[in-house]
Amino acid sequence: DSGVTQTPKHLITATGQRVTLRCSPRSGDLSVYWYQQSLDQGLQFLIQYYNGEERAKGNILERFSAQQFPDLHSELNLSSLELGDSALYFCASSVRVFSEQYFGPGTRLTVT
Amino acid sequence: DQQVKQNSPSLSVQEGRISILNCDYTNSMFDYFLWYKKYPAEGPTFLISISSIKDKNEDGRFTVFLNKSAKHLSLHIVPSQPGDSAVYFCAATNTGANSKLTFGKGITLSVRP
């Protein structure tokens, strides 16, 4: 158990819909990262927050947004969903801006 | 543009033997490298890392070697155990920029009893 929790574990929704994925980092970790893992793809970095502020952006679509709240939990919002958004979404956390990242179990999103 | 490459998608080794997992990178700004292990239905688990100022880092059965001139790193597992069967991801970052990790696509290791 990495100490990072993600909810829900599974999510099935239709195209065009909007969903919110939630992540609680390890106790004491200030940085939160979101990654997408599609079929046959490695982990693609989406976005990073540190203590409530956005620090780095990767290949995140404009239809996707995220935020980190004062209690340090984070949410990833995916809107106008398309079939190609079906993937595993991982959240990770770390103590500082740079240190080893610890991953949650992931949310499997299926868009039908 | 894939900056971290794990060219072999899978590797099968006998229990007790050495497993060598390879990783190549193209970005010369990367200065910190990590290996993660992932079991099905779980998130990746941090395994071992190495800074570019070193060429070797060892932790128990796991050793990572870094060859900066060749932009190549490898993970050695000795001796391999059936419980090591998993997907192994190589990742790299430039600590001077931000902590964004760039991952390879992973190698599936199977350790035969």
Image (cartoon, rainbow, N blue to C red):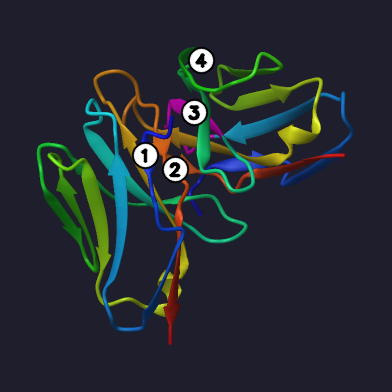
For label 3, the residue is A32
Tag 1 near tag 4, CB within 8 Å: no
Q: Residue B79 carries which label?
A: none
For label 2, the residue is A102
For label 1, the residue is B4
Residue type highlighted by circle 4: Gly
Instruction: Give the distance between the C-alpha atoms of the residues marked 3 and 4, in whole angstroms.
Output: 9 Å
- Secondary structure at numbered mark 2: strand
Q: In the visual, does A64 lie left or right of B2?
A: right
Give A15 or B45, whichever is nearer the viewer. Answer: A15
The stretch of residues the image draws in magenta is A25-35
Residue type highlighted by circle 3: Val
From the image, state whether disc 2 or disc 4 is nearer to you.
2
Sequence-first tag of 3 and 4: 3
Instruction: Give the distance between the C-alpha atoms of the residues marked 2 and 1, in whole angstroms.
Output: 20 Å
Q: Where is residue A17 in the image (x, y as percent from the top left)?
A: 86, 25
Residue A100 showing in the rendered view: no
Q: Which residue is drawn at 68% across and 41% down?
A: A87
Chain letter of the residue carrying label 3:
A
For label 4, the residue is A52
Residue type highlighted by circle 1: Val
Residue type highlighted by circle 2: Tyr
Instruction: Verify whether residue B109 appears in magenta.
Output: no
Instruction: Verify whether residue A31 appears in magenta.
Output: yes
